[in-house]
Image (cartoon, rainbow, N blue to C red):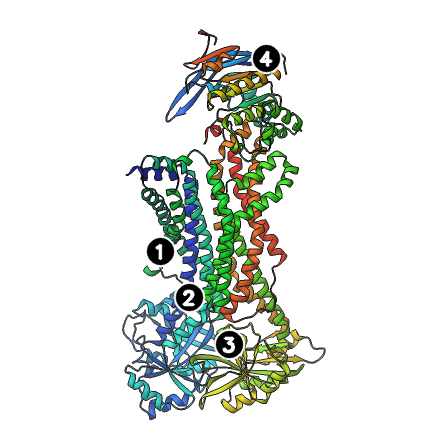
Amino acid sequence: MSMLTRISRRTYARHPGQTILSVVGIALGVAVVLAIDLTTASAERAFESAVDSVGGRATHEIVGGAGEIEESIYARLRIEQGLRTMAPVVRGEVEAQVENAEQPAGVFTLYGIDPFAEAPLRSYFAFGTRETGSEFDLSEFLMGPGAFAVTERVGRRLGWAVGDRVVVEAQGYRSELELVALLQPSDPVAERGLDRILLTDIATAQEALGKVGRIDRIDVRLDEPARVEAMRARLPAGVELRPLADRRETLGELTRAFSLNLQALSLLTLLVGAFLIFNTVSFTVVRRRRAFGVLRALGATRSQVFRMVLLEAVLLGAVGTGLGIALGYGLAHGLLGIVTRTIEDHYFTVSVSSVPFSGADLAFAAALGFAVCVVAALAPAWDATRVPPREVLLQTPLETKWRRWTARGLVLAIALVGVGAVVLSTSVGLTAAYTGLFTILFGAACITPAVCRVVAGAVRPLCRVILGTLGVHAARSATSSLSRTAVATAALMLAVATTVGLGSMISSFRGTVDRWLQFTLVADVFVSPPVSVAERFRVRIDPEVSARIPEVEGVARAAAYRRFEVAGRAGGTDLPVVQCVSILGFEHVADVFEPVQGERAEILERALEGATVLVSEPFAHKHGLVVGDRFELRTPRGLEPFEIGGVFYDYASERGFVVVPRPLFEQHFDPIGISAYALFADVGVDPDELASRVEAAGGITQRLTARSSRGLREASLEVFDRTFQVTAALRLLCVVVAFLGIWSALSSLQLERKQEVGVLRAIGATRRQVVTWITTRTTILGLAAGLFALPVGAAVGWILVHVINRRSFGWSLLSFDVPIAVMVEALVLATAASLLASVPLAMRFARAKVPEALRES
Amino acid sequence: MTQSSDLVTLEGVGHSFREGDARRVVLHGVDASVARGELVAVLGRSGSGKSTLLNLVGGLDAPEEGRILVAGQDLARLGDTARSEFRRRHIGFVFQFFHLLPTLTVFENVLLPSELDSRDAGEHARELLDRVGMSDRADAFPDVLSGGEQQRVALARAIAHRPELLLADEPTGNLDEAGAAVVLDLLVELGREHGCTVIMATHSRDAASRCERVVRIEHGRLVEAGVTVG
């Protein structure tokens, strides 16, 4: 081992506490980024594998104009045109429960297939049963009415056995099915993909899902490009052949902004972690300036010193990253529930029971951890090479240098903030927006030392009044070692600013959604079959039940919503799924549509005449459309153009949707059933009572969920709060990392200032006075970080609301505020973090032996 | 507090330090006394235990064996807070490396010991700074002072609270000849003016020659003018 390596090793071995804190800091940073990456990727992979498993060897799919296809079209294609490599699919979400069981088994996707047509597409029809182990033909089993199969893994998990009778409820329809087989797919990926799937035949699925006579899609296997074009030419109007890859892309598109935002927030934690590493490495450099001076005087070259410091950082990074990967894997399991719940609330149903970990994930985390450590160590390593031997005996020149840097930091900060602002205002993408935000945050971090000076100067008179000269000493010493404390204080400021920013974003969002719900929920009762968000545009109320609803006693008037999904085309891009709604009784709910710009009366008049459609703000934003633009929707007669008459506020769906006025719907689309009703109660009728009566109208035919506007508002806000649980968790982790940072910095600093403790004790300061001195000093730093975090956090919040959110989801918020509670919380958080970090250290140092403390230098 | 003629009494004092797995005995069975107003020099090689003796007398450390009475008070029997309070009322320290607090001005450094005891001694602090010739630098910070100037401020700080006992650990050890002479003069004069008992650890024979009594630490014991007194 070389002498330089020995110096490095002993330096870190002598201060194991500091070493552990910095390793934990980088580990937490890496862990958070990796956990978010693994969690969102797991959910996406699980969904993709479900898509792939049920897709089998299919290459394309045929879909209908309004989301469904008449069963007769399939028959015509298969029999009349002789197309054999295709299979129909009926699918929908069901809640399943074994007969007489106390708890439902959960939500599944019921897949209805035609066993005779499946062979060329899917292979899971020839697996053995658990009982016999012999090969069998699943088609025989699925022939019986109400028969279904699941994988053996699902059966094991739920304790289901062949012969069990299971009640499924889909879109309010209840049916009883019998488990006839347990599948044993040989491919583990396919097995995972089938984790939340119940397989049954077409007829059973149609009945269970209320889709008699209709199918959702036809899976097709077309190996040669020529056959694709040939098939396209033979398809009737109103249906479309599209590659299966589109479905996966649509999925990716759905969650892209959500994933990117989570990743960016996790990177913020890593940024705080990077400050921690920078702090640790620069601190070890600062502490050893004398040693470096001696080494240089003895003939060590600059590159030797540089390599020595960098190697230390790399080793710290290696240990921290290794620990971070293990922690991240564990954390991913913890976050999985929250993230998948959010995805299910807003996007699609997904079953994620495990967090698969690939070599790519490992490489990503390792590269990130190392990169952060090396980048964070570059400046201190460079600084170490610049130590002139003559400076070795004095600490003062370094602090003087730092004071100069503080002044330069102001200039750099202004420049960085300016660059960030320019990037934010001139760019369009989300990545550029985050680059701008991070640049501004970095600029703010550079200004932190100057803020510390200002705050310490401002509170000094107060300290003098309360604590006398000891207070002045505390206030001055708070900023006398900025070379040691500035980075940790900046990290704390960043973390607290993040909490302020996220807090104000959540508050602004909540305020906006609440306000929007108030003018949106104009009706008294909202009724639809019980379905998830993902199924909202596919659900239908049974025609007989639907006819009964407006007649229920106490209903004054009703607006009926026909929701449907069609393919479309906007700005030269194919849109696989466009969600649309057409409303019967539009005039009753017209107030709901608050235009982003333009005269409402004029816009609605044109829409009611059938001249234009209305689109939600996220839809317009996502596809770059404005009022007056045209886009196409696939109707039974093919792609047809629609003009946008107005863009309205909507916060229900980030995909956005299109309102097709009744005249346009009737002109372009075939009739479809009603998906939901908005009901207005007669004067004096209690909305909750009316909701109960409406639910009863479903009878035994179809279960309905009716909610009063108050109930729906509460439920919506509950989903909203759940959505931000991940953000809250990330916010907390960010603060934990910053807390470690300030703790590490303060404990390192105390090691340096131990001699002062000795002096104070020698001239008669009691332990309590020493503790007061140390805690006052650190509280001033925390206060400075907290105070500065307020404007920085408000700016972060503003950018999140008006730039990032807008680019991610297309929502413009109706209000922006930084709640007093968030500001108070931030100040308390920053000062409490500093105080908490310093108290144990202060106690320890107050108890230190005075002669030993005096010998420290 | 008793008013005997001796301010400091050491009875069978022994102390050692851990060095790796072994213990190094620094003081062993030391018996000695220092009369009120006496100016005593403690000579000895580096590591002989001079500083340890001062730390024990000043209550910064407690002896492993025996007892030390200062103004009749056994400091080892006091709790930490009481010991601190005793120190800030009765004892002043001067260190080899000055140990001024870098974030306090010259004036504030001198003021601090009295303030720790909740006494307003601003006027006295200014008089002392004037006495040590540092009144014109009252608002300066220690980092701009020379070593001699810093030690003069440290001396003013040490007697600012009017201690009975002044302990000086190598007060001239880090100064040039001229600076050392000034500090030594001040130490002797201020000690007399304030009626302080002064115990000065030094390895400078010149410094020792200014004292009324010289003792030496040899092999853990105190010897006086070649005669063992303990």
The reply to whether residue A502 is visible in this rendering is no
Label located before the other in sequence (2 or 3): 2
| Quarter occupied by the C terminus of chain A | top left
Three-letter amino acid code at disc 4? Arg
The reply to whether residue A795 is visible in this rendering is yes
Q: Say which residue appears at 53% left-offset and 49% top-offset.
A: A448
Q: Picture coordinates of residue A88 (x, y %)? A: 38, 83
* Gap in angstroms between the C-alphas marked 1 and 2: 23 Å
Question: What is the chain letter for disc 1?
Answer: A
Residue under disc 1 on the same chain as residue under disc 2 = yes
Under circle 1, the secondary element is: helix
Question: What is the chain letter for disc 4?
Answer: B
Residue under disc 4 on the same chain as residue under disc 1 = no
Three-letter amino acid code at disc 1? Ala
* Gap in angstroms between the C-alphas marked 4 and 1: 71 Å
The residue under label 2 is A43
Seen in the picture, residue B19 relative to A572 is either above or below; the reply is above
Side of A705 relative to A576 (left or right)? right
Q: Picture coordinates of residue A364 (x, y %)? A: 36, 58
Closest to the observer, A249 or B109? B109
The label shown at residue B36 is 4
Under circle 2, the secondary element is: helix
The residue under label 1 is A367
Residue lying farthest top?
A: B227
Three-letter amino acid code at disc 3? Phe
Camera-nearest label, 1 or 2: 1
Q: Say which residue appears at 67% left-offset and 27% top-offset.
A: B123
| Quarter occupied by the N terminus of chain A | top left
Label located before the other in sequence (1 or 2): 2
* Gap in angstroms between the C-alphas marked 2 and 4: 84 Å
Closest to the observer, A282 or A516? A282
